[in-house]
Each structure stands twice: as C-alpha cells, then as structure tokens.
Amino acid sequence: MIKTAKERPSGTRSVPVHDERPLIPVKYQHGAVIVLLFLSLVIFFSQIIFNGKTFLGADTIASHSWDNVLKEANAEGVFPLWNPYIFCGFPGYASLTFGGLRIFDISSTLLGGVDIALHYLFLAPPEGWVLGFYFIFGIGMYFFIYSKVKQKLPSLVGSLGAVFSMYIISWVPAGHNTKIAVMAFFPFIFLIVERLREKFNWKLGLLLVFVLHFSFLPAHVQMIFYMYLAIGVYFLYFLLRAFFKKEEWKSIVRTVAVFAAATVLAFAMDADKYLSVWEYNPYSMRGSNPIVQTAGAEKTVEGGLAYDYATAWSFGVGEVATFFVPSWYGFGTTTYQGPLTNNQPLQQNFYFGPEPFTESPQYMGIVILIFAIIGFIRNRRNPFVQYLGIMSIFALLIAFGKEFPIVFDPMFKYFPMFNKFRGPSMILTLVEILVPILAAYGIASFLADRSQSITPVADKKWKYTLGALGILFVLGIFAPGFYKAIYSAFIPEQMLSGKFRNNQQVVNLLYEFFSDKVATDFLFAFGFLFVAFGAIYRHLRRQLSLSVLGAVLVVVVVADLWRIDFQPMDPRPRTDRQEIFTAPDYVQYIKQDTTLFRVLLFENGQPPYDNKLAYWKIQSAYGYQGAKMRWYQDIDDVAGIGNPLVWQLMDVKYVISNTPDSSRVLSLVYNGPQYKVYANRAYVPRAFFVNRYEVASGLDQLRKMQTMSFDVRDVAFFTEDPHLSIEPPTDGAKAEYVHYGLQDLEMNVTATGNNLLFLSESYYPNGWRAFLDGNEIPIYRLDYLFRGVVVPPGTHKLTMTFDPKSFTIGKNASLGMNIVLLCLLGFAGLDYWKKKKAPAIRQGAPPEENTSRPAA
C-alpha cells in the first residue's frame, strides 16, 4: 500500500507544525541569537576573560614589540611613518608594520569607539577587541545566511560553524588579529551586494562604502584580496549565467559599477595608508625580484615573490582528509601524554604533512561539512548555491599551490597582485566561510521536508543511514583497530621516520599515538553525525519539536568544533607576557651604552625572526617583517648577515649570542647566564667620511661585501656614476649626531674638502629629504643599501626628515572624503527619520518563518 501525503508511518506520534510554540517569541529570536553568539565566545574564551590568561603567539609578541616605539612617536608629536629599529631602518607605515592615530579619518575614529565598547563588553582582556570582531563576524554571518534561507535555526548553526571553524578561530592564539578584523565585514559586504543586485538604493551604496572602508582599515592586504576575489567570481558567475540563459543582466552590471565606485571611495578614505603601500611596493621584497637567481626562479614573475617562497605553504592534496579526520597528519599542536614524557602532559607540534609546519588542521566540523554537501546536492539548481560550490572548489584548488600547478601557476603568472602573497593555504578562509552557508542550506532543506509526512521510502533510507552511522560509531568504541587499519593503509609508519628523524622506538610510540587520535576522530565523527541526523529524523517524524532540534544541532556542532579548537590553545598567565618584556640582563648591560649603535642577536648561530629588542629601544640590524626592503634582503642573501664587513656597514657595535664565539672580530664584554655580549672590534660609527667612490653594479657590490674585499672607510660604491668631485677627508673632518628622532635626524658636520659622508641608514627615495644649513641637497644611494651626501668645506648643520608626499596627499584625501560621505550619511539618516515619522499603511506582517525549501 502506498501512503498518501496525509498518512504517516504507524507508531509516529504527530506534533502538528502549527501547534508548536516557539521557546522564544518570534520577535525576540534575532536578539536571542545575538546573545547566544556572544555567550558562545565568552564561554570559549573564558580562560582569557575570567582567569587572567592570554595568548603568547609569535605575532602577538611581535605586535607588542612596537608599544614603546609608538609611545615615542606620541611623545615626539609625529605620526610614525619610519621604523629605525630593524633592518637599518625602513618604512614602518608603508610596510604595514605599525601605524598611528588617524584622527583625520573621522569614521574610523567613530568605529574605534565601537571597538572600545566591544572590548569592555568582553570585560576588557588584552584580546577583548579581537573578540569584538569575532562577534561582529558571527552577527554578519547569521543575518547574511538568514537573508538567503529565511530560517533562523540554519542561520544560527551556519554562523556558529563559521566563527568556530578551526582555522578562523585559531587566529586569536596565533596573533593574526588583522585577519578577523578584515573578514568580520565580509558577510555584511555580501549582504549589501545581494540587496543592490535585487534593487538599487543609493543609501545602501553609501553604506557599502563605509563597510568596505572598515574592512580596509586593518590592512591585511591578502585577506582583502581574497574577499575581492570571492566577490569578483560572484559577479562573473552571475554575468555568465545571465548571458547563457538570456536572463536579465543590467542589474548585475549596475551592481558591479556601484561596487567599483564604492571601492574607489573607500580607498580614498584610506588613501594615506594604501598610497604609502603602493609607493613602497617596488622597493619591497614583495614587489621586486631578488638580485640572484633562486630555486624555482623560472616560475618567478617580475615584481612578485619568488615562486618557491610564495608556495611554501601549499595545502597538500592529501590534507583534504583533515576536513574529515583532523588528526590525519598528526594534527599540529596538541597535548601528548605517554612514555615519551614519563606520562606527563606536554603540548607539542606533531604535524608531519607536506607543509613546512602548521599549528592546526583545516577542520570545519564533520557535521557542518556533511550538511554542506547535502545542502549543495539538494539545492543545486539554486544559482547562489551553485556559486558557493564553484567558489569553494576554486579556492581549494588555489590552496593546493604548487601541488596543483595547473590552476595555481596561471594565477601566479597572470592574475593581478596574486604573486605578492605567500601561503596558498590561507585562501581556505573562504572555504571555511562558504561551507557553513551551504550547511545552512542543507539544514533548511530538511526543515522544509517537515511540511509533508515522511514517505516509506524516505523512512527506510533514514533508518539505513542511522543504522550505518550507529554501527560505525560502535566500531569506534569496541573495535578501534578497524580505523587504525584504515589509517595505516593510507599513512604508513615510514612517513614519520623522515619527518621526526628519531629512533625506531620513538617512531613506533608516536605512530601509535597518531593512530589512537585518528580512531578517536572517527568515533566522534560518527557519534556526532548519528545524533545530528537522528534528531532531524525524529523531527521529520514529528517526535521532536523545532526548539529541541535546534538545541541538539547547536550542541552537536559546537561540541564537534570545540573538541578540535581547544587542542592547540595554550593560554598563559598574563604575567608571562610581562616577563617576556622584562629587560633581560644582557639588555640591561647594553642599555648602559648611550651612544648611537645597532646590535645583532643570534640564537644557535642564526638571527631569530624577532623584534623584541625594539621594545627596549635598542636598534637591531635584523628583525622580523614579511615585506622588508628588497635591497636589505639581497645583502642577506648574497653577503650574509653574519659577515663582519656587513656589520661595519650596518653599524653593529654589539653581537648577542647564546653560543660562545672565538672570532678575532669579537671580544667578550658580558658573560650572562644564557646570552653573551660581544663587542665588535672593527666597529665604525653610524656616520663617517670616505676617501673616494667607485661605480659598480649592484651584484658586484654585494660580491665585494661577501668577500670583504674593500675598506668601508676608504671607498663607497655607487650603482651609477653621479659625476661628483670628491676629496679625501683630512684631520678635522667629523660628523656628530645632535638629534636622532624616529623619522628625523640632525648632525653637526665638518668637512675639509668636498667630502662624501656615508650614513648607516637605509636609502629610500620616497620621502627622505636632506638639508644642509637649510638648503636641500641630494641623498645618494651608497654601498647598495645606505645613504650618502656630499658636504662642502666648513662646518655645517645637516638635517634629514622623512615626509613622504604620498602620506600627505592621502591624509588630505581621507579627511575630505570622510567629511563628504559623513554628510551624505547624515542626510540619509535624516531622510529615513522623516519617512519613519510619516504615517505608514501597514500591509500585513511578513511570515515568521519560511517553511519551504530555499528558492533561487
């Protein structure tokens, strides 16, 4: 007998849809979701908020290294543009290393007030402002998903899935705070774009300008690029669809035009920053090629990063398994407790996959992922769902990087700006945002099925599915060896030997540890899926109310993600950060020297990627920044940072090392318990006169440095002949610093002839100006990286100031655009207020929930 839609399987207790009363009244449900998002963040970060803990990731420490530098800028009353504390000086603002108070950007100042409010909403821990951006991101995801599926439960689950996706939530402990500060506005941008595509509204266009502006402020250019790539593919897909299906296309073109105009206006509001970046780019290692050929140079594109450097963090094709089984490649940073640690818990990074290293897998939640697959299949005719699928696959293929060159290489060679970025796996951020949206479509489609009674065929499929999941879950409890055998078939034990290079006994113990974790992942995966699908099945059979189903799905999704999210977290007492920035003994020793000099720090023979010395106002000849000057990097690549002649050029007076040094160039002056301080016997001052100059190509200059084949006091090198008449200095020639500021300096110089003065300061043509007795003189590039000026006979006052025109022009543009757009925003608000006060004819309330399957 075939049952009709009005019939239901025997034994099913009916709970009519219209008899269900929501746990929370409909008008309060959006507010309840916002509260729930907030509470989820509070609970997850409770150690940070309530227990006085903090995260000490490398990038977090790096950002705090500039605290005192920024205080110095405020004390001097200058906007910090130049950074003299690393790399012999380089553009600090244009390289996005730090920035100052942009009071001329009125709208961002107002946003700063919201930022402070959110910071205190989370009880003001150091990471409070970052949690505020996660809160904004979660709200944006919820309302964007709701605009598509018109149901609150799927929207809530999707927003939680995006916020707590492993890669996205891991930005907090890693200190990658600007990533979430950019992506927090991504769903709002998409929501506005969708509304504009439906119907043009100048007020929405104006709002889009401000939202884009806020996403530009954190200046994580790579995240901004990925955001624009996703929106660009969106426009392209719908244009092509309209063309092939002969559908209406003018609204799409109009939206593209509005979006482009909004981008230009938003850029103008941030012009001071991005004009500076644009100006610096040709001198950055991200905007120019190395002077020497490197491995993979045949694929390197002029004006971009070296191919091998750009693709170092390519996502391995096999790592797709971590979407389902997060421990497949050792997980990353997790806690080990066993024979190797005398059964004591120890957090260690065990990742052994194809990337150089990673802190955690790219895990989006098995429940979210399966719902997303179902969402795509069941809504595959929906154009927006098609876009979500296309963009997700495209982003994944790009993430493979050099592992899948058929997609990555053309992008690297031909797509604008693409070759400026490293770490292809970072684009998986888009996947971890789009997949939860697809998951919401999947849940919404199941809820739509409840409007009809479940058919016998469907009922049988549900029972088979739940039965299979139940069996697989029980296998995980009583026969974990089944999953270990699957793991060993794909990941043999030999893969560990090459990665860890330990004896066989250690490899055996680690492999057993990894196998256990994989078996546990399988157990939890099938357990969570069984509960989630079991709850939906009972809801479809009208045995479970929507409120209870919602509670089950939220708990399952959160538990699935939090089980993984917590593993790499390692919050430390806030006092630990204070200890990190407590001046160590060797710093206290060096600070006794009040002259002008630089130092070099070595750990186990290599300079660390570290800027901590800047916190104590000690200038280093090295440092950590992903966009350092190309000329500096060339010196490091060819001549080497451990080269004594390079030390002379870079004004290195002291070398700090945790290993002993018997070099004749260095003499031990402080023998600390961990670090020793050596004085450079061949030290020369920051500025000195040279006897003559020669002309040599850049590479020849670097080779001469490498072989230490010239005397830095005798000769300086130009890359092009300046046709100067230079005389050797005689007795009485001297150069003394009177003032050395953050981005200006003053010297008293005495020349005995037409003398060439060498300054151990990075040459940068866009902004540095030199004045001799108030008259501007040219600054020359000497010895590949450094500055030089010609001083005529006599005693003079030499000053140099850093005042790039790009910043001045951009600042004025930002202020002007802010005034115009804020006035327009005020007019829009006044217009809205007037219309709201006018009597309105109520045409009926909108439906509370859409119980039909999401439409195109």
Image (spheres, rainbow, N blue to C red):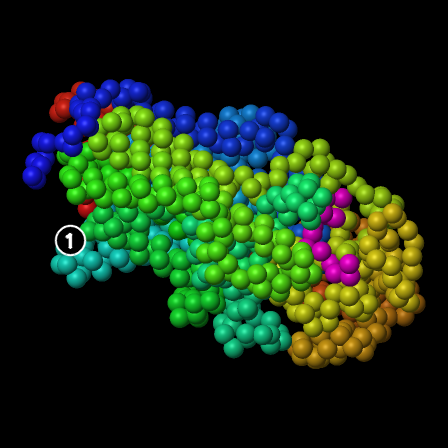
Q: Residue 250 placed where, x, y %?
A: 19, 53
> From this viewpoint, which residue is outermost toward the front?
478
Q: Residue 590 placed where, x, y %?
A: 85, 48
Q: Which amino acid lies under the numbered mark 1 shown in the image of this protein?
A: Glu
Which residue position is annotated with label 1? 248
Residue drawn at x 19%, y 37% as measured from the top left: 449
State left or right for residue 111 relative to residue 581.
Answer: left
Res 87 quadrant in image = bottom right
Q: Is residue 324 visible?
A: yes
State left or right for residue 418 relative to residue 244.
Answer: right
State left or right for residue 479 relative to residue 386.
Answer: right
Res 642 quadrant in image = bottom right
Q: In the picture shown, does residue 840 fall above or below 62?
A: above
Residue drawn at x 92%, y 60% as measured from the top left: 667
Q: Residue 784 placed where, x, y %?
A: 69, 70
Magenta residues (range): 604-616
Observer-nearest of 763 and 179: 179
Q: Residue 351 placed where, x, y %?
A: 57, 54
